Amino acid sequence: MIASKQIEVIETIVTIVTIVTIKTIKKLNSKCFEGITFLSKDVQRVGGWCESIRFGLSGLVLEQNSLKTKVV
């Protein structure tokens, strides 16, 4: 439960930072589409990374639950 909430917080922070960065780039230079394209690719990478963390953590939680069951 705690792990999934932490992941949600991380994803929210990444999203906010991304939006702010894109808006800043647009303000600095409205012709800076290449930078925005590169940024969106990085965001996709980060999104994939968050997804893999989520699967990894859910796997750990399942593993912990099965260990508790075995011990009890």
Image (tube, rainbow, N blue to C red):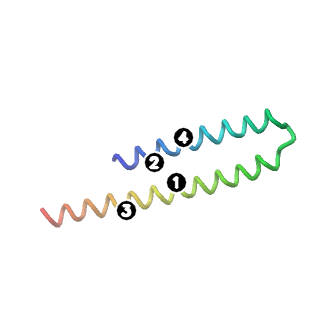
Q: Residue at x 57, y 44 (%)?
A: 14
The answer to which of marks 3 and 1 sits earlier in the sequence is: 1
Compared to residue 70, the image places residue 14 above or below, namely above
Closer to the eye: label 3 or 4:
4
Residue kind at label 2, given as amino acid type: Ile
Compared to residue 24, the image places residue 53 above or below, namely below
Q: Which residue is mark 1?
A: 50
Q: Is residue 7 left or right of residue 23?
A: left
Q: Secondary structure at mark 1?
A: helix
- Image marks 2 and 1: residues in contact by CB distance under 8 Å: yes
Residue located farthest toward the front when viewing the structure as drawn: 28
The answer to which of marks 1 and 4 sits earlier in the sequence is: 4
Q: What crowding class fits label 1: few (fewer than 14 Cα within 10 Å), some (14-19), or many (20 or more)? A: some
Q: Position of residue 50 (x, y in %)?
A: 52, 54
Q: Secondary structure at mark 4?
A: helix
Q: Which residue is mark 2?
A: 7
Q: Secondary structure at mark 3?
A: helix
The answer to which of marks 2 and 1 sits earlier in the sequence is: 2
Compared to residue 62, the image places residue 28 above or below, namely above
Q: What is the spatial separation of the Cα atoms under label 1 and label 4, in whole angstroms?
A: 12 Å
Q: Which residue is mark 4?
A: 13
Quadrant hosting residue 25: top right
Q: Is residue 51 left or right of residue 40?
A: left
Residue kind at label 1, given as amino acid type: Cys
Q: Which residue is mark 3?
A: 59
Q: Residue at x 77, y 50 (%)?
A: 37
Q: What is the spatial separation of the Cα atoms under label 3 and label 1, in whole angstroms?
A: 14 Å
The answer to which of marks 3 and 4 sits earlier in the sequence is: 4
Q: What is the spatial separation of the Cα atoms under label 2 and label 1, in whole angstroms?
A: 7 Å
Q: Residue at x 53, y 40 (%)?
A: 12
Q: Is residue 13 left or right of residue 22?
A: left
Q: Position of residue 63 (x, y in %)?
A: 30, 64
